[in-house]
């Protein structure tokens, strides 16, 4: 009897332990399932967060790549210029006026910002753009291969040429390129005029601006200068500040455009503005104000 009771108790204990063991396994399995589900949910949430962050980053990059958004965000269109009548020059109150200056102001207004003008070293115009000290070069800029390869340029808006400036008293001696070989020239550094005298193998001194080149000839420190024909028409000859100077030989024909940073969306915006301004007559009206209407190119 004692043996039977002992055996019964032993079996009961074994069954009890087995039951306890089964309960622990079930709990452990449930915990593992819950943990796996939580991990999966966390992974999905992390993935979703990463996708959102990537989308936000992409949107931010797209915005940062937009010059138009950049200009509108800061509220100014910074225009790189030199003293260049009739395109960019100062009136008696020190305000920048001229065909280019007035058109730049109107374009800036169409963007909801203000135009700010900064005089630059023309030879460094590309560096100024890339360094974001200016937003565009808008100063009777000739569309040379160098310019169009380094900048995002607008459509051409004015015709131009490089012309030789000499004292009126000796103008009859310099009527073709062959007659120019013995002259010393003053030209704006980095300009189309400098490129022309280099191509002809002429002796020259680089100066900061075309206005400085005129002063060199007027002072007698250079025999001649090469400047834009539109500037020559406004600044030399009878009734101007350089009445004793005149222009003779035309060295080329060229076109003006406005330059922005490479890839800038402002160039397309300006092309649209030019087209609208030409269509409504305001571009021609501005050109007539400064006497450049004959050079204006249809948009």
Image: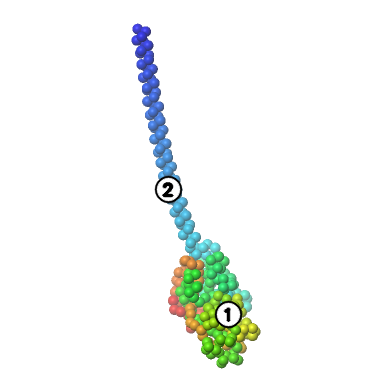
As drawn, 279 above or below 171: above
As drawn, 20 above or below 184: above
Instruction: Please provide percent x and percent y for residue 25.
Output: 39, 28
Instruction: Please provide percent x and percent y for residue 178.
Output: 53, 88
Q: Is mark 2 on a helix, strand or loop?
A: helix
Query: Which quadrant is home to the N terminus?
Result: top left
Residue 220 or residue 64, whichever sits in front: 220
As drawn, 148 above or below 26: below
Q: Is mark 1 on a helix, strand or loop?
A: strand
Q: Can residue 207 be seen in this view?
A: yes
User: Residue at the top extreme?
Assistant: 1
Q: Residue 154 carries which label?
A: none
**Mark 2 or mark 1: whose residue is earlier in sequence:** 2
Q: Name the residue under label 1.
A: 187
Instruction: Please provide percent x and percent y for residue 112.
Output: 51, 66
Q: Which of marks 2 and 1 is in front?
A: 1
- Mark 1 burial class by Cα count in 10 Å: few <14, some 14-19, many 20+: many
Q: Mark 2 points at which residue?
A: 48
């Amino acid at each position: 009897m004692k043996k039977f009771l002992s055996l019964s108790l032993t079996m009961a204990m074994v069954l009890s332990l087995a039951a306890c063991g089964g309960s622990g396994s079930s709990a452990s399995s449930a915990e593992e399932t819950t943990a796996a589900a939580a991990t999966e949910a966390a992974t999905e949430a992390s993935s979703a967060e990463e996708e959102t962050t990537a989308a936000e980053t992409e949107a931010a990059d797209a915005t940062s790549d937009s010059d138009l958004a950049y200009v509108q965000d800061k509220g100014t269109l910074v225009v790189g210029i030199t003293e260049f009548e009739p395109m960019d020059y100062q009136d008696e109150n020190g305000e920048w006026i001229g065909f280019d200056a007035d058109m730049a102001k109107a374009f800036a207004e169409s963007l909801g910002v203000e135009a700010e003008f900064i005089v630059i070293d023309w030879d460094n115009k590309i560096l100024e753009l890339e360094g974001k000290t200016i937003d565009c070069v808008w100063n009777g800029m000739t569309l040379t291969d160098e310019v169009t390869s380094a900048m995002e340029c607008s459509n051409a808006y004015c015709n131009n040429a490089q012309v030789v400036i000499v004292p009126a008293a000796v103008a009859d001696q310099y009527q073709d390129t062959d007659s120019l070989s013995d002259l010393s020239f003053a030209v704006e550094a980095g300009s189309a005029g400098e490129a022309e005298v280099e191509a002809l193998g002429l002796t020259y001194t680089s100066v900061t601006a075309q206005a400085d080149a005129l002063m060199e000839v007027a002072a007698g420190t250079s025999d001649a200068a090469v400047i834009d024909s539109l500037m020559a028409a406004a600044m030399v000859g009878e009734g101007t500040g350089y009445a004793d100077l005149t222009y003779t030989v035309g060295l080329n024909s060229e076109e003006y455009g406005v330059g922005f940073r490479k890839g800038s969306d402002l160039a397309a915006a300006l092309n649209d503005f030019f087209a609208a301004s030409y269509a409504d007559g305001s571009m021609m009206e501005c050109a007539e104000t400064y006497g450049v209407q004959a050079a204006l190119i249809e948009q």
